[in-house]
Image (cartoon, coloured by chain):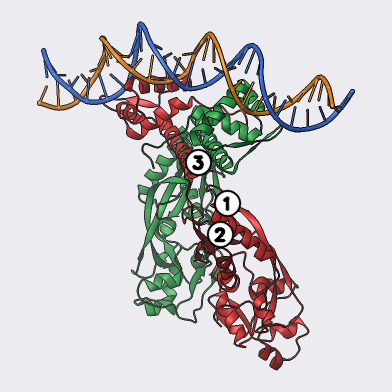
Chain colours: A green, B red, C blue, D orange
Amino acid sequence: MGIRRKLPPLTALTAFEAAARLSSFTKAAAELGVTQAAVSRQIQLLESQFGFPLFARLHRKIEVTDRGRLLASASQEAFDLISASVAEITKESQETEVTIAATVAFSHFWLLPRISDFSRQHPGINLRIVTQDNMPNIESNKLDIAVRFGNGMWPDGQATLLFDDEIFPICSPQYAQTAGKIETLQELVNNPLISNMVDDPTWSGWSEWLAAFSMELPKKTSGLRCSFYTEAIYAALNGQGIALGWRHLVEDLLIQGQLVRVTDFTVKTRNAYFAVVSKRRLPSEATRLFQSWLAETADAPAMANQVTAVL
Amino acid sequence: MGIRRKLPPLTALTAFEAAARLSSFTKAAAELGVTQAAVSRQIQLLESQFGFPLFARLHRKIEVTDRGRLLASASQEAFDLISASVAEITKESQETEVTIAATVAFSHFWLLPRISDFSRQHPGINLRIVTQDNMPNIESNKLDIAVRFGNGMWPDGQATLLFDDEIFPICSPQYAQTAGKIETLQELVNNPLISNMVDDPTWSGWSEWLAAFSMELPKKTSGLRCSFYTEAIYAALNGQGIALGWRHLVEDLLIQGQLVRVTDFTVKTRNAYFAVVSKRRLPSEATRLFQSWLAETADAPAMANQVTAVL
DNA sequence: GTTGAGCATAATCTCGCCTTATGTGTTGAA
DNA sequence: TTCAACACATAAGGCGAGATTATGCTCAAC
């Protein structure tokens, strides 16, 4: 459909769209700043070109036909689209605020511990972080950047890869000491396994993790069942059992020695973390700076000396 | 935004859109059937009006700027929208096929038992029924009508109410006889309660139904747990316990005496059944006929003599 | 250095679109 | 019934947006 499409005369279409919206040639003419006759002619032109009427001429009013209604709604959408785009590229705001959306876990364990580094580099830029687990819509929530986990295909924005991830069991050093050496997955599942509620289908829980090694989660398992991933990690920090650690989320805690890995078994996730920006909006300079900082920081090795969130 | 929007010259915009898409003024000119100079002038006009370049002029090629890219993508979408709409209203097909989407339960218990009536009235129209539980997209699946359960607000189409619904417990006559009289909800929950898996948030299960009477579903309940609603109803028909009956779905079976109500407790649903048609497409005569048949039949009382699906 | 591909610029023309003026049909008040 | 008023249609004519033709400019390739 892209190439060689047949478009009706667009000036005529604007006249038609206004007339349909206002249900009046005269009002449409006033809105467009032309005479009523001009609108009448333009619409006749369209109608003769299509070969059917767009309006039913009633006594002192007009009424769009079914076909006309369809065309009017499409035209209105189209012109709104153009108009919004023009407004977007025309406005020259020195935007100093950047709004970022991320999940609770990502925010807490990755973004917030690192964010001060960005603010130090760019003191003039104000960051607003929207922490929300269900995927927010970029347009309607006025987001500049959303950090999402998935396959990189989203309809509302352009995604750039931050990093893949992998998942492995972790626990506190104390717990590891008392539990003793864990060699097999069978030994592993005899420990209390800390899990959390998931409604995100891309998220992996214990049963999916074990399934990667063709193992089933035993019917009867002990271990906490938390509402959020953050709580699961804190439970592990408190020595209450073994949780699933997502590498980039727990890396700081591993380096600081607050968590340890209990086995070498690990699962690489099929999905990955992406930074998503709107297709519709022009990224401000501040947004662009944040995006490149995000990409750089995602590439950089985890920092041991990093101060981690409230512990 | 609707009124008095400021649009750039649209002919210039078509030139720009083509140039951006083809990355060449010359090719754009060829596509539009004008000279290269014309395209060049139009784009200059746009640029001077905006006050910034839309293309970076490189040596033997051009490259859209960031702002240009945004405008180009919006323009392309807009023109595609118009072009599609024009194609839709221009085509004059005597469509004789109507494609209807509905859930498994609605299809099985309501639509299919009644459909022959429509075919008898309109032998020339071929019906294609897409039975699918997750909500299909109207545009991409080329649906003419979708029957949906919800609040009537969907972004992709215009909904007209078919009927409200209510939910009450039902079982087979044999089961009712052996179970004896059921007066209270407490007696009710002591029976095996047949349920089915739900992922639809608008769907109500036993716990939601009981909650309407400020009652909790006991932790320990007996009763089958089916994958689909249809299976739950068949389980009830087989006398395996008490299921939740949706009035319009089980009405035929009630009238035929294959199912009976066990209590007068009933819950009116907040949502309702709607027939949804695309905003983008012009309903064919056949579609319109089917839609009015649907509305009439939904209004009509249930028919006892109706032959019901394979039993 | 010469060539040539692709965009810019200038001068000119023309037809698409607007305006003015008037016609037609319907309605509602006198 | 009549007539004024309102809303869209139609006709004639003018003007300017946008097309054309012709030529210039620039830079990479040979």
Query: What distance separates the C-alpha of mark 3 from that of mark 2?
Result: 36 Å
Q: Which image quarter holds the C terminus of chain B?
A: bottom right
Mark 1 or 3, closer to the camera: 1
What amino acid type should be assigned to the residue bearing mark 2? Answer: Ala
Pointers 2 and 1 in contact (C-beta within 8 Å): yes
Residue at the image point whose x is 38% and y is 40% from the top:
A2
Instruction: Name the residue tied to disc 1.
Output: B157
Residue B146, numbered circle: 2
Query: Mark 2: few, some, or many residues within 10 Å (few <14, many ≥20)?
Result: many
Task: Return the chain for callout 2.
Answer: B
Residue A18 location in percent, x, y? 60, 31
In-image side of D27 versus B287 (left or right): left
Label 2 and label 1: CA atoms lie apart by 9 Å
Distance between the Cα atoms at labels 1 and 3? Answer: 29 Å
Tell which of B292 and B189 is nearer to you.
B292
Query: Are dots 3 and 2 on a single chain?
Result: no
Task: Name the element at disc 1.
Answer: strand
**Above or below — where is A112 with respect to C10?**
below
Q: Position of residue B143 (x, y in %)?
A: 50, 57
Q: Which residue in the structure is indicated by mark 3?
A: A144
Examine the rendering and report whether any part of residue B76 can be seen.
yes
